[in-house]
Amino acid sequence: MSRETEKVFKELDKFLADKEIESEEQAQALMEQFMTQYNASSLMRKGEITPETADDYLELAEGADTKKMGLKYAKKALELEPDNLDAEVMVAELSSSNYEQLIEKYQKLIMSATEKLKNDGYFREEYIGDFWGVLETRPYMRLLDKYASLLVNTMRIREAMKQYEEMLRLCENDNLGARYRLMHLYVYFEDEQAALALYNQYEQENSTQFLLPLSILYYKKLNLKESLKYLKLLKKANKDTQEFFEAIINYDMGDYLENRNPFGYRPFTIEEFFVEMEENHFILASMTSYYDWALKKMKNMK
């Protein structure tokens, strides 16, 4: 795979990250939209099209070959739109030399953005719970998501929990998947009550990213009967559950990761397991004993 191809796949992953794909037709339409935007961005980078808007410069910043050029484009976007939160976030990311600097900058941006949105009336009751449905509040949700993810990566787990809980308060439909990260954080602290409340909040959604952590939760609490109940639901929901456990036990994950679908993962397949592993490595990577136990149980299931 060439570097250019890898770059396209990386940009495609970003483009699809917050989109729910429910049909092949929708996937095709999104692919066409992405390629149109990517080609336009490529022409702008080559100087064949002159960037005009803040969004144009943000696209250039995202596709820049160096941090220096990316920062230059992001600052230009911010110059054109001083209140563009996405541009402010990108400037913060590209100008930070370590996690602690970035955390501090995220915190300042959240404080100022919260104040602005309150002044603009977006924290009124009519908007709470529907922040992704309002274009003006989407950048704020993206910022909260980035901040919460960075807190997890630096093991500020309880602070990350607060952020994900706030995201679900502001956006009940959870278009960014905060509920899945939050479930794993509850399991990390073995908080059975919170985990079940979240599971019930989403009508006992039988997704891989709910059922696996719930099974692990009860394994950690020595309630193997309950752990087995969720394991059975997981096996029923995701046909590749046993294959994933075998790959984990045998340290045979290389081929799966190298051949990952560039167009996003397919739900209820082994691809979803590896996405889950990447995003929640802090807990899932340490559960070898669970995988061994679960694999033995699965082999005896009818």
Image: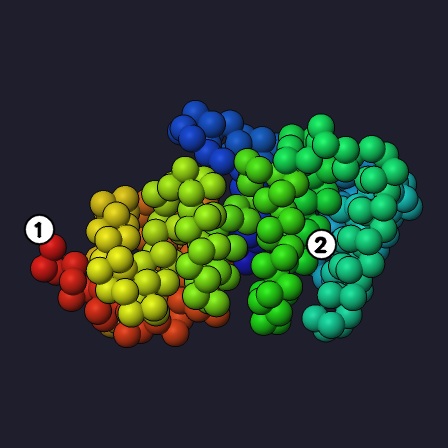
In the rendered image, the residue lying farthest to the front is 193
Number of numbered tags placed on the structure image:
2
**SS type, badge 1:** loop
Q: Is residue 97 left or right of residue 205?
A: right
Residue 57 to residue 106: above or below: above
Q: Residue at x 42, y 43 (%)?
A: 200
Mark 2 / mark 1, whichever is N-terminal: 2
Colour option used? rainbow
Mark 1 packing: few (<14 Cα in 10 Å), some, or many (20+)?
A: few
* Viewer-proximal residue among 156 and 31: 156
Q: Quadrant of residue 202?
A: top left
Q: In the image, residue 258 lies at what x, y percent?
A: 39, 60
- The residue where tag 1 is placed is 302
Specify whether 267 is left or right of 197. Answer: left
* Cα separation between marks 2 and 1: 53 Å
Residue under the image location 77 percent in, 70 percent down: 101
Q: Which residue is mark 2?
A: 64
Q: Residue sitting at 55 percent across and 58 percent down? A: 3
Picture coordinates of residue 176, whole percent (x, y): 57, 44
